[in-house]
Image: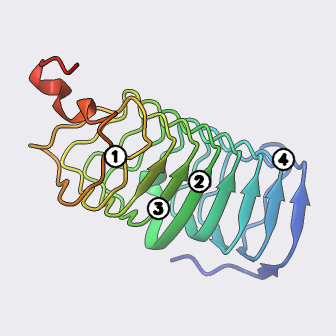
Amino acid sequence: MTVHPKLIEDKTYTGIDFSVTKFPKSSYEHCTFEGCTFSNLTNQEFLECTFIACNLSNANVTECAFKEVDFIDCKLVGVGFTTCNSFLLSFSFKGCNMSFTNFYNLPIPKTRFSDCNLTNADFTEAKATAVHFENCILEGATFDRTDISKANFTTALHFTLNPATNSIKKAIFSKDNVSGLVQHHDIIIK
């Protein structure tokens, strides 16, 4: 874990393009980022921070620490969370475009995704126990050797996952979306 030169607390950043302006390497606690653009968050640390309407598409998050971080109405297309620091990793997403995000082999238990577009997201080998996909689009999302025990898919849309290659014990599905569990068997449900 990188030791940061300073701690920044309780600060709000609004409308800053950090892909042009250098983003200071620090530990950020209880900070809010609103309408900002990021391209590189390498070795940054965020504790109890909120990102609102920010663009982090394709941002480099290598060794970035997200601890109790909320993303609201953000664009996170193509973010490879698999490279971030997984120690005490904890975040939630609401109203975010997260197409092509990568959570490969990450421990993301109890993560809440609400009203998110997770088209073509990769959850391969993720430890996603008790994850909640509330009103999320999961078309083309990959679940392979993923632990989604106790996960909630009740209102998830367009997902396909194979119960034979994923741990799904006590996962919750609705009768309206159960077809996503058997689609690989090439059967028809009416």
Residue at x 28% of width, y 45% of height: 124
Residue 111 is marked as 3
**Residue bearing the label numbered 1:** 123
> Decide: marks 4, 2 in contact (CB < 8 A)?
no
Number of the label disc, if any, that sits on residue 93: 2
Q: CA distance from mark 4 to mark 3?
A: 23 Å
User: Please, what is the three-letter code of the amino acid marked with disc 3?
Assistant: Thr
Element assignment for label 3: loop
Label count reads 4
Distance between the Cα atoms at labels 4 and 2?
Answer: 16 Å
Who comes first in sequence, dot 3 or dot 2?
2
Which quadrant holds the C terminus?
top left
- Helix, strand, or loop for circle 2? strand
Which three-letter amino acid code belongs to the residue tagged 1?
Phe
User: What amino acid does circle 4 point to?
Assistant: Gly
Q: Along the polypeptide, which appears first: circle 1 or circle 2?
A: 2
Q: Which disc, if any, is residue 35?
A: 4
Identify residue type, mark 2: Phe
Q: CA distance from mark 1 to mark 3?
A: 12 Å
Residue occupying image coordinates x 24% and y 60%? 149
> Which tag, 4 or 3, sits closer to the chain's start?
4
- Considering only order in the chain, which callout, 1 or 4, is on the residue closer to the N terminus? 4
**Residue drawn where x is 42% and y is 34% of the image:** 138
Mark pair 3, 2: CA separation? 8 Å
Looking at the image, is mark 4 or mark 2 earlier in the sequence? 4
Looking at marks 1 and 3 on the same chain, the residue that comes earlier in the sequence is marked by 3
- In terms of depth relative to the viewer, which is nearer, 159 or 170? 170
